[in-house]
Image: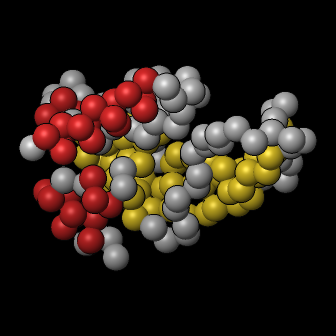
Amino acid sequence: MKTGALIIAFAIAALGTAPAAACIPEPPPHWPSILRADGPTLFIGRVTTVETLPEPRRTTTLEITESRAVIERLEAIQGQPKPTYALTAAESVRRLGDYAGMVCVDFQRVKVGDLVLGMEAPNGALRLFEPHQVPPEFTSRIEAYR
């Protein structure tokens, strides 16, 4: 018990000294707050294309090659999803100059043919859930499109 408490205390202390730009993953979905009458738009979709964008995006420290995935709505679960969505994310990242700091970007994790559970946030942003985050009641509905 003391060892566990010591490890937790060390981890908390280490987090306190981490740089402000540390990579923090999105929290797991809280399905009770998502699956409600006035909840966000949810849909099942299929990735129809993934294309690398012709020009990389550059910051003062990074060059980011991005791709755009197009997702076609197959089934509306909640709300009024659009017929298609586009999701732009990093394909690769190259440090510029002597930059050696942390690199935090969203990488493209889908490929053509993937079936996804998507959520449109109120601000229009698209979130695709990882397969392990999909609630069991939607797994069979997604599998029906294979």
Left or right: where does residue 123 sit relative to residue 108? left
In which image quadrant can residue 121 be found? top left
Left or right: where does residue 80 sit relative to residue 71? left
Depth check: give the residue in front, 49 or 89.
Answer: 89
In which image quadrant can residue 61 be found? top right
In which image quadrant can residue 44 be found? bottom left
Residue at 65% of width from left, 42% of height from top?
A: 103
Q: How is the image coloured?
A: secondary structure
Task: Please state the horizontal and vertical placement of residue 50, each as a whole percent of the image.
Answer: 64, 61
- Numbered disc total: 0
Q: Residue furthest bottom?
A: 146
Left or right: where does residue 129 sit relative to residue 58? left
Q: Is residue 136 above or below residue 143?
A: above
Depth check: give the residue in front, 118 or 12.
Answer: 12
Task: Please state the horizontal and vertical placement of residue 77, each as a whole percent of the image.
Answer: 25, 46
In this orientation, does residue 86 appear? no
Residue at 51% of width from left, 29% of height from top?
A: 18
Task: Please state the horizontal and vertical placement of residue 9, each as a whole percent of the image.
Answer: 27, 32
Q: Residue furthest front?
A: 2
Q: Residue furthest left?
A: 1
Quarter in which the C terminus is drawn: bottom left
Quarter in which the N terminus is drawn: top left
Depth check: give the residue in front, 13 or 29.
Answer: 13
In this orientation, does residue 121 appear? yes
Depth check: give the residue in front, 133 or 125.
Answer: 133
Residue at 21% of width from left, 63% of height from top?
A: 139
